[in-house]
Image (cartoon, rainbow, N blue to C red):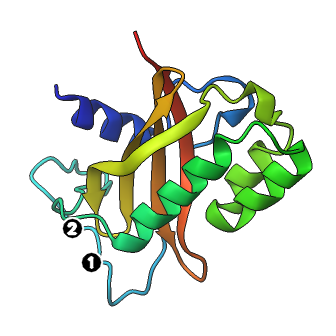
Amino acid sequence: MGSAAVLAALLLSGCGSTSGPTETPPPPPITSSASSTPAPSRSAGDNDSGDLEYTPGPSQPPAAAAQTVAERFARLWARHDVPANVWWQDLEPLCTPQLHEKLRDTDPGNVPADAITGHAQAVLSRRGEAVFHLRATGGGTLILGTAQIEHLGWRVVTVDFQRAS
């Protein structure tokens, strides 16, 4: 399975290896108006219990706003030179309330990246959700899951960091 497919599976299942206090719960359900999200439909794999199978929409280029949020979050997340309360407050408008609360006790000095280089590279993108890789100095890749949240816009919903091997 390709790395994008594995990452997509991890993001959608809520699993992933995160270090320390940056661990996040599975992303909240993506909500949108009924006119923009098709209702789930029965497929050949559905059983007689009435359960529906999730079939993700087709891949598409990521929304520019999603990439902007991912890049801004990454650059603020990788700062070691600010007090913890400032670091935490600066991330608030870029992530979901659930992720923001999970990051509350993070010491920016323990963030495993020194800086972010280059632009976010989308590895998965569908309507309303996208996963980005960002290269970090200090050896690793920051992986951010983003989602378009009703009344909030694009927000980071998951944070993962993979150290270079």
Q: Mark 1 Cα within 10 Å, few/some/many (few <14, many 20+)? A: few
Q: Nearer the viewer, residue 84 or 59?
A: 84
| Residue 7 to residue 126: above or below | above
Badge nearest the viewer, 1 or 2: 1
Q: Position of residue 140 (x, y in %)?
A: 46, 24
Q: Residue furthest bottom?
A: 35
Find disc 2 in the rendering and name its residue.
41
Is residue 149 depicted above or below 131 in this figure? below
Is residue 144 visible to us here? yes
Q: Mark 1 and mark 2: span between their CA atoms?
A: 9 Å
- Residue 98 relative to residue 57: left or right: right
Q: Nearer the viewer, residue 54 or 77?
A: 77
Please give the name of the residue rendered at 18% of the width and 64% of the height, measured from the top-left corner.
60
Residue sitting at x 21%, y 63%: 57
SS at mark 2?
loop
**Side of 59 relative to 27 (left or right):** left
Q: Which residue shows up at 86% across the image and 38% down it?
A: 105
Which residue has dot 1 on it?
38
Query: Do the CB atoms of the residues marked 1 and 2 lie less than 8 Å apart?
Result: yes
Q: Amino acid at mark 2?
A: Ser
How crowded pointer 2 is (Cα within 10 Å; few <14, some 14-19, many 20+) is rated as: few
Quadrant where the image shows the C terminus? top left
Above or below — where is 139 with respect to 154? Answer: above
Picture quadrant where residue 143 is located: top left
